[in-house]
Image (cartoon, rainbow, N blue to C red):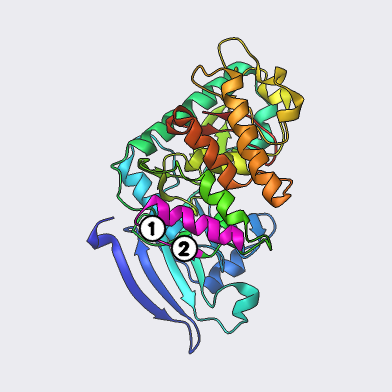
Amino acid sequence: MSTAEEKHNVQSVGSGPQVNILYSAPGFAVLDPDTIKTMANPSNTIFGWGGVQIVRISPEVVVKYGSHVTLHEAKSMVFVDQNTETVPVPKILAYYSYGPIDRDVDDCGSLYDNYIFMSFVEGQRLDKVWDTYDSVTKSRIAGHLKGYLDELRQVEHRNYIGSVDRGPLRDSILGDLEYKGPFDSEDDFNNAIINAYQDTTPKRHVKNVLVGMLSSQKGRNIVFTHGDFRHPNIMVNDGNVTGIVDWEFSGWYPEHWEFVKALVKLHAIVPSHCDHLPIGPSESISKRPARIAPVAPPLLLPPVPSRALSQPLLGATSSFLSANDSPELHPVAVMSLAARLPGLSTQPICFLQSFARSPVVV
């Protein structure tokens, strides 16, 4: 964004909270919080939960606002728009903070609400229509998504792990959506993950297991990463991708992070979603052993024998589960798998994931 477009315009709202406009596109009329709340109604509210509201305030514009909306998300979207040619990110029109608001910070998470105005994206969420598409359409969508991630990963690399402006990151893996970082090395990043997990378990000896599982996670490229690349955040219309939304977890991460985030959120294989995605030269995903299903997602890989994939995953998983008695796959187990199969994590990755069920394309 050019300096001329940046704003630091503080507007008082009576004697209470203030609007601090940080960016406004030329010619865009920024609406104040009271006006937006007056305009919001059930017919134009796209989303409303957990301190986040998304309201379509005109045919062309939506506003995302609330105590859990981050201005980091807006900055990331501006960055992607300016540094890629094809990635379909909504156009940022303005963003501001509003506060301090007289409320309990423990209940709301912040004394400030953030507001992001962006272009409306036509279409439906991919998770709502994926099962209605034929194999040709699914393959085309997967190909387009792979291209978008290729382009994101080709943006000039950074030498830190953090948000787009060298700020901290927010991810549940780092602990209760708290901001952590930025990190100067992968070791620092991995230690933050381990420490966040240790805070949730009484078994202190598990740290040695986790550290050992991450011992090979060094020397990876740091690439720009969406951080939540799955079905609900991909918009499609008539079988074509129209937008990628929800960039709040985006930033500069090790190149395997997109892969890690997909596996962490995937708990089951659904064969009907996977029949058209081969795992290797001759094996269909849906024919894989059922015992792998709770921990391994369907993958479209470069030619890798299924045994080479399943054994490291099962080994990493069994090591972690024996130490922790956890029914779910922890990020450290996934990262250990990524370390054992470097070709897996360095490939541009597309995730087609509808909540707990869907294909993942690597």
Q: Is mark 2 on a helix, strand or loop?
A: strand
Which residue matches tag 1? 183
Magenta stretch, overall SS: helix
Name the residue located 63 percent from the left edge and 13 percent from the top edge.
283
CB under 8 Å between discs 2 and 1: yes
Q: Residue 336 location in percent, x, y?
A: 53, 40
- Occupied quadrant, residue 96: bottom left
Which image quadrant for residue 361? top right
Label 2 – label 1 distance at C-alpha: 8 Å
Along the horizontal axis of the image, is 109 left or right of 24?
right
Q: Observer-nearest residue: 62 or 201?
A: 201
In the rendered structure, which amino acid carries the disc numbered 1? Phe
**Does 194 appear in magenta?**
yes
Q: Does the magenta stretch include residue 170?
A: no
Q: Nearer the viewer, residue 291 or 136?
A: 291
Q: Disc 1 on helix, strand or loop?
A: loop
Which disc, if any, is residue 228? none
Q: What stretch is highlighted in magenta?
A: 179-198
Most foreground residue, 193 or 258: 193
- Label placed on residue 180: 2
